[in-house]
Image (cartoon, coloured by chain):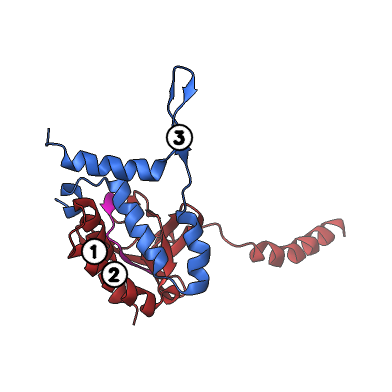
Amino acid sequence: MSFAWKQAGLTYNRYLAVAARVVRRSLKDDKRLAAERRGDMDLRFAKWTNGKQGEMTNVADANAAAYVEKANAPAS
Amino acid sequence: MNSLRVARAALRARPAALRIPVQQRGYAEAVNDKIKLSLSLPHQSIYKSQDVVQVNIAAESGEMGVLAHHVPSIEQLKPGIVEVIEESGATKQFFLSGGFAVVQPNSVLSINAVEGFPIEDFSADAIRAQVAEAQKVANGSGSEQDIAEAKIELEVLESLQAYVK
């Protein structure tokens, strides 16, 4: 089986997250508000070099940027 | 006189002895035609090892119905409907966002998904609004990732639209 999302460089994990997000958004208002809180992620990280903390980066933003970079890089 | 009393006591004891059920099991009762279903989400168990008659799932390899004594298999689920026919005969429909169904030996079925809700919890208006938005992104000139994600959303929404009127 070949999936379109796989060819676009998405992982199965990302596929599931996108599918779950759209399911949550399709709910009736009362259920949706409770469910959408489950989709929130607020993780941040910083790289330390020479004893100094680098810039704080949101994990979700960094991942999105990494996907784009991976797709633009020549296939190895 | 003494022997007469013993005989009478024995007579009185017999009906009680007859009332004890015979510890025997017929062939028909020995065959269990129920399947134990566990339908779990990361935040909730909808079914917890509950006996049900049949479960219909939408696998990537096709729609399938699972009864007791099914061949063990692992199926990737499409975003779609899982239909559970309970012991009482009532049918319940859940929309799952995708996951895995594991048919284990001795009539045990485990279904794992990220999100799953009864079909009546969905709003047709919310789905319609999202279809329009996802179509705009899918036909737009965004990055390949954005387009791929919009296409996933469209796949889920089209599946939902077939059930939510």
**Stretch in magenta:** B72-83
Task: Determine the image quadrant of residue A64.
Answer: top left
Residue identified by numbered label 3: A45
Return the x and y of residue B89 as percentages of the image width and height: 42, 76
Return the x and y of residue A42 as percentages of the image width and height: 48, 46
Q: Secondary structure at mark 1?
A: helix
Q: Residue furthest bottom?
A: B165
Q: Are marks 3 and 1 in contact (CB under 8 Å)?
A: no
Chain containing the residue with disc 3: A
Which numbered disc covers residue B133? 2
Q: Is residue B133 magenta?
A: no
Q: Is residue B74 magenta?
A: yes
Which numbered disc covers residue A32? none
Q: Is residue B15 above or below residue B120?
A: above
Q: Residue furthest top?
A: A50
The residue that appears at 38% across and 75% down in the rendered structure is: B126
Q: Colour of chain A?
A: blue
The residue that appears at 47% across and 42% down in the rendered structure is: A43
Chain containing the residue with disc 2: B
Q: Secondary structure at mark 3?
A: strand
Residue identified by numbered label 1: B137
Image quadrant containing the C terminus of chain B: bottom left
Circle 3 Cα neighbour tier, 10 Å, few/some/many (<14 / 14–19 / ≥20): few
Q: Secondary structure at mark 2?
A: helix
Q: Amino acid at mark 2?
A: Glu
Q: Are marks 2 and 1 in contact (CB under 8 Å)?
A: yes
Circle 1 Cα neighbour tier, 10 Å, few/some/many (<14 / 14–19 / ≥20): some
